[in-house]
Amino acid sequence: MKPKYVTNIKLVLFLRFLCGYYYEMEIPRRLKTVAKAYCIFFLLFYLILHHLYCSFSNHTAKWSLYLEYSIYVFMSLYSKKMYLMDYYTSSRIIDFEPHSRIYKKLNIYLAILIPFLVVLKIVNMVTFCLSKSFNCWSWVSLLHNLLWNFTVLGRIPPVFVFALLFCRARIIRRTLEDFGIDHGQTGKYSTKKFIQMYETLVDGFKKTEHPSKQLLTVFLLCSTPKLILETFLMLNKIKESGPIVEKLAVYAIETFYTHLFFVVSSILFDLINVDLQRIKILIVEKRMKTKNLKHRNEVEKLFQFVQSQTIECTLWRVLSLNVRNILSFVSFAVTTIIAVLQIKNNNIY
């Protein structure tokens, strides 16, 4: 029996496959070998073609883009993206609750995400061409911007992971709010049922946590030096010739486009933590209102279980994925660059 998925994840994976990212397809073994060979050939062919003809690109940005795209392709060959397909497989424990209609919104979200990224890149391309007096619709410009889109498609699997995690956490929260906790261990919404639901939530995330962290780490290592360098150059240009609207627009759109998936992942994870905290509060309120000692003990066991099964996403064991850290980094980077420019202006540097 073929597995049923909560949303059409296979379509997204197939679109990524056309861009060189392999995933495990239900095809004969020989065709799988051909599919892997296609991914490697597509990577080499496109990078060589881009390197030969896109000479207008910034060398630092170009080589960091080559490196990032290559790593994502080889990671897809290694992981086969089975973790996404397994994660998106429907679970009888949690995905068939009354509030599972939230997956319709997830379908809309996934359907909008990729076209939105393409449109945003087109806007970025037009503003860049206008500021540099390039032909926006030349095949060389198209070649360069397609590579950007391919790389962005390699970054987005963590967004899919956190989006589904958010949906499942929201299902548990709404089920608690609307139906409460039944007495005994045999009710439809008993403490045993909620333990199973929460356990499914945590286990699913743990299976996808490691590959998601790998992708986030690669992105940060490849994009952070480029971001700092481009910010420094932009502030230096502003200092020398004043703010130029076209260049500021190009910088703002490209920075937003490059880091959009990371910001969305952080927002989703913050929303997940809000739902998890709300789940704990609802359980505590239920425990306080329960007069039956046996039922209160069952609710207490549920609370202890939820309390012990934490969901965290930290990079290098120190950097938590949340919006607060992103804002702190942006503030620190901008302040540091302004200070360096000021020192340079005073001939102290």
Image (tube, rainbow, N blue to C red):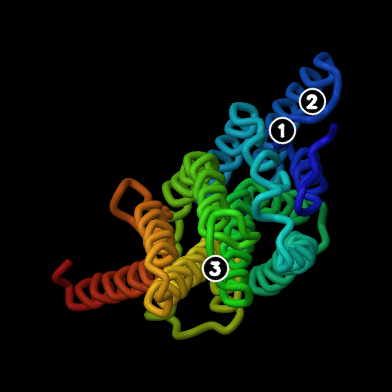
**Quarter of the image with the C terminus in it:** bottom left
The Cα atoms of the two marked residues, 2 and 3, are separated by 49 Å
> Residue placed at 71% from the left, 33% from the top?
22
Under tag 1, what secondary structure?
A: loop
Task: Determine whether 58 is above or below 177 in the image.
Answer: above
Residue nearest the viewer, comparing 337 with 257: 257
* Residue type at numbered disc 3: Ile
Category of crowding for the residue at label 2, using alpha-carbon neighbours closer than 10 angstroms: few (below 14), some (14–19), many (at least 20): many
Mark 1: few/some/many CA within 10 Å (<14, 14-19, 20+): many
Work out which quarter of the rendered image holds the N terminus and state it.
top right
* Residue nearest the viewer, comparing 286 with 112: 286
At numbered mark 3, what does the secondary structure look like: helix, strand or loop? loop
The residue labelled by disc 2 is 35
Residue ID at (70%, 37%): 21
Location of mark 3 (residue)? 181
Quarter-wise, where is residue 306 in the image?
bottom left
| Amino acid carrying mark 1 in the image | Tyr
Judge from the rendering whether residue 269 lies leftward or rightward of residue 148; answer left or right: left
